[in-house]
Amino acid sequence: MSDQYDDLDIHPGETLQELLEIQNLSAEELALKTNVSPSYINQILNGERDITHHMAVALEEALGVDKMFWINLQALYDDPNG
């Protein structure tokens, strides 16, 4: 039997990508604002790297989105049954 939340298994990088589009920012611009490499940001955007606590703080400072949003989003992705 399929869980009703299977379709909600979305990596936080997808949400970050949508936010970058809304704010008209590139991955390279976000990398500069968060003091990481563009490849690091691209790995998050591609679902190849998790959003760590440190990165959540950097995203809060760069994008104005509370760090707990990113931490919770990652936690839900890691364990959707919480």
Image (cartoon, helix red, strand yellow):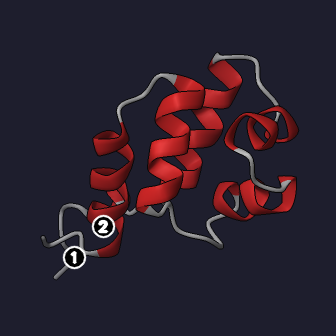
Q: Residue 24: x and y, percent?
A: 75, 17
Rendered-image quadrant of the N terminus: bottom left
Q: Which residue is mark 1?
A: 2
Q: Which residue is mark 2?
A: 6
Q: Give the secondary structure at mark 2.
A: helix
Above-or-below relation of 77 to 17: below
Q: Nearer the viewer, residue 29 or 73?
A: 29
Report whether residue 61 is seen: yes
Q: State the residue lying farthest toward the bottom.
A: 1
- The amino acid on which the numbered mark 1 sits, given as a three-letter code, is Ser
Q: Residue 42: x and y, percent?
A: 78, 57
Q: Whole-Å distance between the Cαs marked 2 and 1?
A: 7 Å
Report whether residue 10 is seen: no
Residue 36 image-quadrant placement: bottom right
Q: Would residue 65 appear left or right of 34 to someone viewing this image?
A: left
- The amino acid on which the numbered mark 2 sits, given as a three-letter code, is Asp
Q: Give the secondary structure at mark 1.
A: loop
What residue lies at 70% left-to-right and 62% top-to-bottom?
46
Q: Would residue 82 appear left or right of 80 to someone viewing this image?
A: left
Rendered-image quadrant of the C terminus: bottom left
Q: Residue 30: x and y, percent?
A: 74, 36
Q: Residue 74: x and y, percent?
A: 37, 60
Label 2 neighbourhood size at 10 Å, few (<14), some (14-19), many (20+)? Answer: few
